[in-house]
Image (spheres, coloured by chain):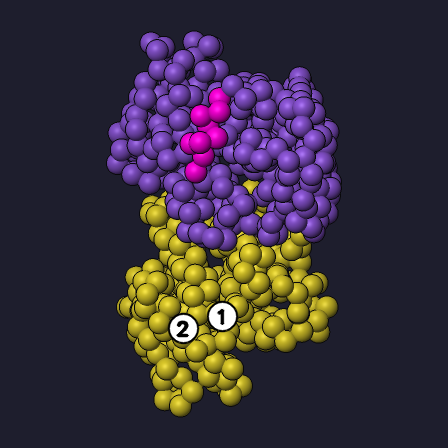
Chain colours: A yellow, B purple
Amino acid sequence: MRTFVTGAAGFIGSNLADYLLKMGIEVVGYDNFSTGHHEFLRGAIEHKNFSLVKGDTLDIDNLTNSMKGCDFIFHLAANADVRFGTEHPRKDLEQNTIATFNVLEAMRLNGIQRIAFSSTGSIYGESNIIPTPENAPFPIQTSLYGASKLACEGLLQAYAEGFDFQCYIFRFVSILGKRYSHGHVFDFYKSLNNNSENLKVLGNGHQRKSYLNIQDCLDAIFLAIEKAKEKINIFNLGTDETCEVNDSIRWITESLNLNPGLIYSGGDRGWIGDNPLIFLDCNKIRSLGWKPKFSIQESILQTLNFLRKNKWLLENSK
Amino acid sequence: MRTFVTGAAGFIGSNLADYLLKMGIEVVGYDNFSTGHHEFLRGAIEHKNFSLVKGDTLDIDNLTNSMKGCDFIFHLAANADVRFGTEHPRKDLEQNTIATFNVLEAMRLNGIQRIAFSSTGSIYGESNIIPTPENAPFPIQTSLYGASKLACEGLLQAYAEGFDFQCYIFRFVSILGKRYSHGHVFDFYKSLNNNSENLKVLGNGHQRKSYLNIQDCLDAIFLAIEKAKEKINIFNLGTDETCEVNDSIRWITESLNLNPGLIYSGGDRGWIGDNPLIFLDCNKIRSLGWKPKFSIQESILQTLNFLRKNKWLLENSK
């Protein structure tokens, strides 16, 4: 099997590439390096089964050419900047919706029909049903990011129906672990690194969140691809735990031996469009025999340790 | 109130424009005339409260300028060619998803925050719950058209949340009546007009469909806008009746005094992505006091009579 991974130099993409190579699977990595890092591919790049193409998912010709000869697409490239969606609404449209359309068209032109896609638990908006199952009531979108991922899912499904594709859609909670370089652990660590006396916290700190470890995430993806055989396969991926932002702060500061003053911005959410809780019902993937190996606390500390060893990421952050 | 109607020269748009003008409301009509007809605006164009802009929804500058000074947007312009989506997948993306994004951005740039949008019952894919309510389980898309309307709905909702818009989303069944110029009654009448001996029928004729009259549709839209005051208001619009394609054929041929041989293409659906039945639970709009005045049979015959008086449409069809 020859796989094609968009966003291969990103957090999830680079871990996925390593995972595939370890399984003896060929990988063509595709990334525009707008937020990805060559450093994340340091191991992969030396592997005989890995090749790298610098390219943008908005460049459909490059995408189509680069995909030639592949059998399975992992489409991970995306604008993952959930929080600042309202500052540049076009970004989600272009980098998520249109980019995904391009990936599907490039597949169609190459006769490739199998794709796995990283969607998000944000797609459920503010569901009344918590934990939220895959067949929750028709959701109302609360962010441009969620709306763009919804659009992508719809496209994948329509291609599955219209062009006989097989698709795997994974609705993630936030992912933690090695090469994590975007999100609250990053922000807190960076902030404490600059000023260990005080820590600004968006919201009131009581926002509950659910996080999944990257290794657990990849295990789940491969189990699903191995066992689920429908035309359209949709899986929530998360843990059965939640933590409060305040828990996370405690774990981080204790691990760093710091005791900063906490300055809350207030309110029950961090920003407009932030969900107070994304907590997914993961019985569907669990029924295939998967369960997460790492607790949220372990994942947060693992992430923190990765960042402590990779301080260059703090300077590089965009 | 000054309203802006995209797709103003189309079937629904031109009827809407007439309706608004009759209510004493100013209308700026916007259409690129790719499928719209000047003829449909013959009445409106003479009205002092109507002005017309020729423009494309993909031209965001023209859209933004034309919208200036309006308070409420009716966004109806769309690729309504549901059936041939797989022949040109980019059309739904551009004319529906990207065009809707442009409309929302043009509104934001102009400080306009209220919008009504024509979505579709196709968005429910092949729901297991029939009649299908607005909060049916998270649907799976079965057509590029449905997927693009899903994307549009998500965008409207995200703008409502992120930019304090108020939106009205109407999920239509197929609409019939005056100026109808696209769909099965049109196809059958055109075909019988060319050859009254035989009629080709996609599928087995047993596909059940639900249709709503344009007048009932517009009454429902205005009632919803008057009475529903949420930030995001979603309504199914349909009748509580269904008919089979075969019923429709019988009504049409009897009215035309014809007795053609029927040649079925076979199968339980007309084309890939065609839903065997779109039948919507309309209790939500009914609870506001609306009910349809026209039966499906009356609407089909009204449509047929319109087409008989407007044969120029048969030649003009694209």
In the image, what residue type sits under mark 2? Met
Highlighted magenta segment, given as a residue range: B310-318
Q: Nearer the viewer, residue A293 or A86?
A: A86
Residue A312 horizontal/vertical position (percent): 30, 74
**Is A181 displayed left or right of B309 in the figure?**
left
Residue B284 horizontal/vertical position (percent): 66, 28
Tell me if residue B137 comes above or below residue A242 in the rendering.
Answer: above
Count residues near mark 2 (Cα–Cα under 10 Å), then give few for <14, some for 14-19, many for 20+.
many
**Is A261 displayed left or right of B243 in the figure?**
left
CA–CA distance in space, label 1 to label 2: 9 Å
Q: Residue at x 66, y 17 (%)?
A: B293
Residue B202 horizontal/vertical position (percent): 63, 45
In the image, what residue type sits under mark 1? Ile
Residue on which disc 1 sits: A112
Residue B28 horizontal/vertical position (percent): 35, 21
Residue contact at pointers 1 and 2, CB within 8 angstroms: yes
N-terminal label among 1 and 2: 2
Q: Nearer the viewer, residue B104 or A269?
A: B104
Q: Of the numbered discs in the image, which one, if any, rests on residue A67?
A: 2
Q: Chain of mark 2?
A: A
